[in-house]
Amino acid sequence: MGIESFPDFAESALRRWVLIPASTRQRLISNVWCGHCRHGTTITDFRGIVENGNLLLVGKCAECQGAVVRVIDGA
Ligand SMILES: [Zn+2]
């Protein structure tokens, strides 16, 4: 996956995201808690931002289309 695969990432978020191994990124994407579904789900249509020093993925639940956020600590 190249940088061009994540057009919706802020530059600061993208710099951190690309340092995470692809297998780990896949696990993070596919293991996001959805408060509506009440279980882990896959985040879709997500973008990346950095907030309070944490890398955040902001997107939608693949099942219910509700808003979900994945905080990636220490990335
Ligand atoms: Zn959901």
Image: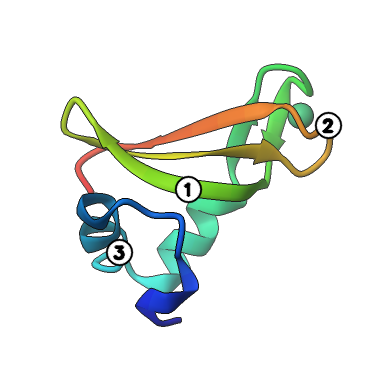
Which of the labelled discs sits on residue 64, or is there none?
2
- Ranked by sequence position, the earlier of labels 3 and 1 is 3
Which of the labelled discs sits on residue 20, or is there none?
3
Identified at 27% across, 51% down, the residue is 13
Rounded to the nearest angstrom, the CA distance separating label 3 from label 2 is: 27 Å
Identified at 19% across, 25% down, the residue is 52
Residue type of the residue flagged with mark 1: Arg
Q: Is mark 2 within 8 Å of ligand 1?
A: yes
Residue type of the residue flagged with mark 2: Cys
User: Splitting the image into four quadrants, where does ligand 1 fall?
Assistant: top right
Using the rendered view, name the quadrant where residue 68 is placed.
top right
Q: Label 1 near label 2: C-beta < 8 Å?
A: no
Decide: is 50 above or below 37: below
Question: Which residue matches tag 1?
Answer: 47
Decide: is 17 above or below 49: below
Q: Label 1 near label 3: C-beta < 8 Å?
A: no
Give the left or right position of residue 62, taking residue 22 as reference. right
How far across and how far down the image is residue 6, in percent? 45, 65
Rounded to the nearest angstrom, the CA distance separating label 3 from label 1 is: 15 Å
- Ranked by sequence position, the earlier of labels 2 and 1 is 1
Residue type of the residue flagged with mark 3: Ile
How far across and how far down the image is residue 67, in percent? 65, 27
